[in-house]
Structure formats: C-alpha cells, structure tokens
Image (cartoon, rainbow, N blue to C red):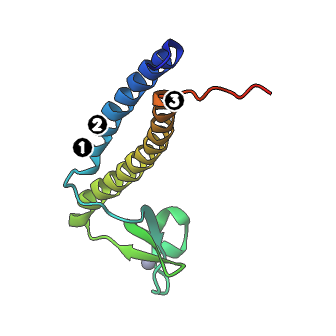
Amino acid sequence: MIQSSKKQALSRYRQQARAVQAERQVLESALMGTEALVEGCLVVVRTVCGKAGCRCRTSRRRRHGPYLHLSLLRNGKTRMIHLPRQWEEAAREGVEAARRFRRAHQQWRALNRRMENLWRQVERNRRYLPYEPKKKSR
Ligand SMILES: [Zn+2]
C-alpha cells in the first residue's frame, strides 16, 4: 500500500496535471489555427525623393507618404519591403497573428516544463517498496 501522505500528495499533483492539460489544450487549438503568419514588423516610412525643389525637402511633415513597410531580419541584415495599399490589411493581420502564435508557443513550452515536473512528482509519490528487507542487527 502507498502511505496516506503520499496519496494526498498524489491527488494534489494529479489535480494540477489536469489543470495544466486543460490550459495546454486551449493553447494548442490557438496554435493550430490557419491564419497566415507574417514575419517581421510594420514600419511607417515618410520619404524624401530625388527631385530638386520638391516639397518633401522643405520639412519633415511634407515628406512623401506615409508608406507602410515590412521590416525583416534576413541573414543578420534588416530588409525593408514596401507594402502596396491593398496588402496593408493582410500584413497587419498576419503580423498580429504571428505575434499571438509566438506568445502561445512560449506559454505552451512553459506548461510542458511544468508538466514534466508534475510527472516526476507523480512518479515519486507512486513509488513504494513491496518488500522491506529486515535490517541485520549487529
Ligand atoms: Zn519629393
């Protein structure tokens, strides 16, 4: 028989494991969504052109734009990709979806680590010796 203090601990750890399982399941449904994930972050850019005497050179507020760019890190370098107007909405949603994905994945990994610890506790509290050899008296 497992002793009663172990039984109590075991029931506590099983309860915690169930809670972690439920939490993890919610995250898993979110991770398995189908929305497109867009890498990088959005940057609003206002530019100066090359034309002599253009208004954009007179003040920052009279620059061209604002244009939306996607800033990406590729091979250690930052790349800027100009987004045409018709892509802006999709890019915003995709960047937001990617952020949510990363956060959910991070939380999922943390829950997995907690689960590993709980399984170790469960194992420890389920252990018992079926036979206690008599100690030799000297
Ligand atoms: Zn200009």
Q: What's the distance in space between the residues labelled 3 and 1, CA to CA? A: 42 Å
Q: Are marks 3 and 2 in contact (CB under 8 Å)?
A: no
CB at disc 2 and ligand 1 closer than 8 Å: no
Q: Decide which of tag 3 and tag 1 comes sooner along the chain.
A: 1
Residue wearing tag 2: 26
Q: Quadrant of residue 72?
A: bottom left
Residue wearing tag 3: 129
Element type where label 1 sits in the image: helix
Q: Quadrant of residue 19?
A: top left
Residue wearing tag 1: 29
Q: Decide which of tag 3 and tag 2 comes sooner along the chain.
A: 2
Q: Position of residue 31 (x, y in %)?
A: 29, 49
**Which residue lies at the image location 63% right of the left edge and 26% below the top edge?**
134
Element type where label 3 sits in the image: loop
**Residue nearer the viewer, 80 or 58:** 80
Q: Position of residue 117 (x, y in %)?
A: 51, 38
Element type where label 2 sits in the image: helix
**Which residue lies at the image location 31% right of the left edge and 56% below the top edge?**
92
* Left or right: residue 32 compared with residue 111: left
Q: Which residue extends farthest right?
A: 138
Q: Tell me if mark 1 has few (under 14), some (14-19) or many (20+) residues whose alpha carbon lies within 10 angstroms of its own.
A: few
Specify the amino acid type for callout 2.
Val
Q: Position of residue 100 (x, y in %)?
A: 36, 48
**Residue nearer the viewer, 92 or 126:** 126
Q: Are marks 2 and 1 in contact (CB under 8 Å)?
A: yes
Image height of 12 relative to 62, above or below: above
Image height of 108 relative to 13, above or below: below
Q: Position of residue 41 (x, y in %)?
A: 43, 62
Specify the amino acid type for callout 1.
Ser
Specify the amino acid type for callout 3.
Leu
**Which residue lies at the image location 59% right of the left edge and 29% below the top edge?**
133
